[in-house]
Image: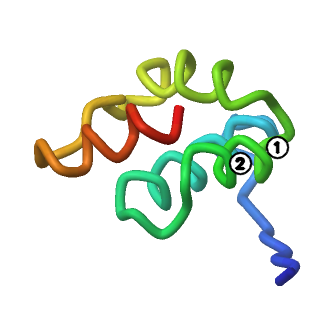
Amino acid sequence: MKRLTLDLPDSVELSEFDVKMIIACQLYQQSKLSSGQAAGLVGISKREFLESMGKYGFSLFSESIEDLRSDVEHA
């Protein structure tokens, strides 16, 4: 597993959890991570991850019907 260190300016008022969620959501939407992998990155359950995506401006729904079917099959 890769480790990433990120220095954010003090003016960026995001918690470590928020940063992890934003990155995990982005990687999930780009199909770089499964929902389970994204949840693991953040340290929460898959259900909790999927339910929280909207709070960070990301949609739970896939862009194609095939992606949606795959998500449903692997949920």
Q: Give x and y (percent) for residue 49.
A: 63, 28
The residue labelled by disc 1 is 16
- Count all numbered tags in the image, as a single digit: 2
Foreground: disc 2 or disc 1: 2
**Residue at x-position 59% and y-position 51%:** 24
For label 2, the crowd category at 10 Å Cα-Cα, with few meaning under 14, some 14 to 19 and many 20 or more, is some
Tag 1 secondary structure: helix
C-beta proximity under 8 Å, tags 2 and 1: yes
Tell me how far mark 2 sits from mark 1, CA to CA. 6 Å
Q: Quadrant of residue 59?
A: top left
Q: Horizontal placement of 60 versus 7: left or right? A: left
Q: Nearer the viewer, residue 69 or 11?
A: 69
- The residue lying at 48 percent from left, 19 percent from top is 55
Image position of 8 (left or right of 68): right
Mark 1 surroundings: few (<14), some (14-19) or many (≥20) residues within 10 A: few
- Disc 2 designates what residue? 20
| Image quadrant assignment for residue 4 | bottom right
Residue 19 visible (yes or no)? no
Q: Is residue 68 left or right of residue 36?
A: left
- Residue 58 x/y as whole percent: 36, 34
Q: Position of residue 44 (x, y in %)?
A: 81, 31
- The residue that appears at 64% across and 50% down in the rendered structure is 38
Question: Which amino acid type corresponds to the residue marked 1 in the rendered image?
Answer: Glu
- The answer to which image quadrant residue 34 occupies is bottom right
Q: Regarding mark 2 in the picture, which secondary structure is present there?
A: helix
The residue sitting at 79% across, 47% down in the picture is 40
In this view of the protein, can residue 16 be seen by the observer? yes
